[in-house]
Image: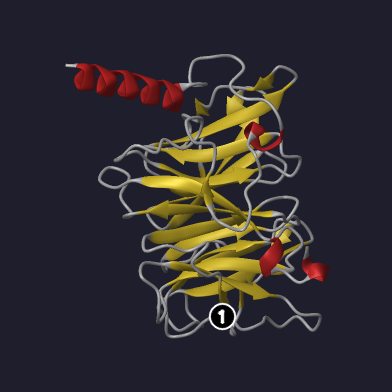
Amino acid sequence: MKQITKKIGWLVAFLGINTVGLCAEPFAKGPYLGQIPPGPVAQVFAPGLISDIRPQTWESNGTFSANGKTFCFARGKGVFITENTDRGWTTPKRIKSVPETPWAPYLSWDAKSIYFMYSHDLYRCTRTARGWAKLQKLGPPISSPDAEWGFSLAADNSFYLASTRKGGRGSGDIWCIPFVDNTWSQAINIPVINTRYSDGAPGVAPDESFLVFNSVRPGCQGADLYLSLRQSDGTWTTPKNLGPRVNSAYLDICPYISPDKKYLFFTRSDGFDPRKHSANIYWVELKEHLPESYR
């Protein structure tokens, strides 16, 4: 009987830890939602606040605004946002303008737009004085008749995305779509990264000095994260696997570089369907993976 009582008490305590902040005000305080920065080993981001570590729960694709005061992420079937005010971080609120089960939501650096994928097309939802507007489908050169497989934005709004569009190898290549004169120009293939393997979801640094992407290559147990540096002549270095302290036997996907370039955020999942699988947001320090001039 005592063992049963202890188990019940432990379960209540566990659930309490994992729901703290969901109703309390303020939700959290401090930079990065008050979390202790990680070291070189990947850790769950904000367990009990953002990431629910219980089975069959889904949190993914965490992104911050440039000033670090707005955080956007996917939870279950929706996209949520929290903002750092004078009182602390607000309780995450769902953006109702974004349809259920979008893929790879991404907060713009100015926190005025949320980009996401839906049925392999790219969309944008813009913040107005009255709230979040209806979604807007992005046409060429962002979207194409072919499948798009994850993306990110540089600080100047240039797009980096994975796509099966013409001009690549067809299995999923990475492209850059520069933002020039207030518009997106023609997509540019990044050849050193594109191989016969399916590369996806490039997360680019704000200054475009490096990017991280997920791929299934020899030696991977699930999907691993790889790093490539942009050199002074504009070419990219041979991708480097980030190793076992970052990658796992699960799907390590959808990387995102923090505004200060100190941390890598990514999603670790046992599948791709939020209705059937589990996912959590992880983060890890990038210092040991970057030459000093890139930090």
Quarter of the rendering containing residue 65: top right
- Which residue is farthest left? 1
Q: Is residue 249 above or below residue 50?
A: below
Whether residue 137 is visible to the viewer of this picture, yes or no, is no
Residue at x 61% of width, y 37% of height: 71
Quarter occupied by the N terminus: top left
Residue 15, image x, y percentages: 37, 24
Q: Amino acid at mark 1?
A: Ile
Q: In front here: 228 or 47?
A: 47
- Residue 54 placement, left or right of 104: left
Residue pointed to by mark 1 = 193
69 left or right of 245 in image: right
Residue 204: x percent and y percent?
65, 62
In-image side of 233 versus 267 (left or right): right
**On-image quarter of the C terminus:** bottom right
User: Which residue shows up at 73% across the image and 57% down it?
Assistant: 206
Residue 142 appears in which quarter of the rendering? bottom right
Q: Residue at x 59, y 85 (%)?
A: 192
